[in-house]
Amino acid sequence: MAGPWPLPWSPTACGVARSAIRNVLPRWGVSELVPTAELLASELVCNALRHAVGPLLLTLERVSGLRCQVSDGSSEPPCPTDSGPEDEDGRGLALVDMLAARWGYEHGPVGKSVWFELSVDVDTAGLDGRHTPWIGETDLHGLDALKSEAA
C-alpha cells in the first residue's frame, strides 16, 4: 500500500494525486493503468473538493490491479447526477462506473472513502461483461440511466 497522502484542500489536489499515481504505478509494474487511474482519481478528488469537507487523503493499494481511495471529511455518500447533453459537469461518477472494474464507498471514523479498482486489463473493462460495479449496500438511484445515456 502507498499512502495515505494528505492532499491540499485546493484545486492543486488533483495534480498532486495524478503525480502520486504516475510515481507509484510504474514501480508496481502496472504502468498501463496510469492514464485511467489519473482520470478517475482526478474525478474523485474534484468531487470531494466540490461536495465535501477536509481533510483530503489519497491511498493507493496494489491488488490484482489497483485500488485507489480518496477520503474526505464528509459522511455524505457520493451521489451520481443525471447530466443532460448540454451540462458542463456531473459526469464524474458515471466515468468511474464505466471505467472501473469495481467502485464504491465506505464510511470511516471521520467522513468517508470513495474508491475504485482497475484490473490490469483495463482497456476491456466494461466492454466484455467483466465490468462489475459495486457500490456497497447502497443503491445509487439513477446510475442505470446514466450508463444508458453514456452507451
Image (cartoon, rainbow, N blue to C red):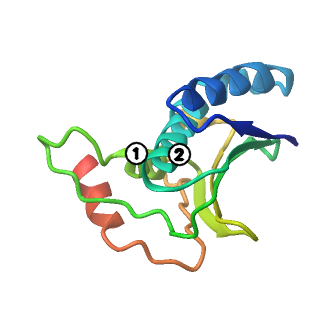
Q: Position of residue 43 (x, y in %)?
A: 48, 40
Query: Which of 47 and 38 lies nearest the eye of the viewer?
Result: 47
Q: Tell me the residue at 35%/74% (across/down).
A: 141
Amino acid type for the residue under numbered disc 2 = Leu
Q: Tell me the residue at 65%/65% (across/down).
A: 111
Q: CA distance from mark 2 to mark 1?
A: 7 Å
Q: Position of residue 13 (x, y in %)?
A: 59, 31
Of helix, strand and loop, which one carries label 2? helix
Residue 92 numbered mark, or none: 1
Question: Can the viewer see residue 145?
Answer: yes
Of helix, strand and loop, which one carries label 1? helix
Q: Tell me the residue at 58%/57% (across/down).
A: 103
For the residues labelled 2 and 1, say whether their Cβ atoms are less than 8 Å apart. yes
| Quadrant of image for the N terminus | top right
Amino acid type for the residue under numbered disc 1 = Gly
> Mark 2 = which residue?
44
Instruction: Give the vertical position of 102 relative to 26 (above or below).
Output: below
Question: Can the viewer see residue 151?
Answer: no
Q: Position of residue 94 (x, y in %)?
A: 38, 51
Query: Which of 12 and 21 lies nearest the eye of the viewer?
Result: 12
Q: How would you rate the neighbour count of disc 1 (Cα within 10 Å): few for under 14, some for 14-19, many for 20 or more?
A: some
Q: Earlier in the sequence, mark 2 or mark 1?
A: 2
Instruction: Residue lying at the far left in this picture: please name it.
Output: 86
Instruction: Give the vertical position of 136 relative to 34 (above or below).
Output: below
Q: Position of residue 6 (x, y in %)?
A: 74, 39
Q: How would you rate the neighbour count of disc 2 (Cα within 10 Å): few for under 14, some for 14-19, many for 20 or more?
A: many
Q: Tell me the residue at 53%/45% (across/down).
A: 44
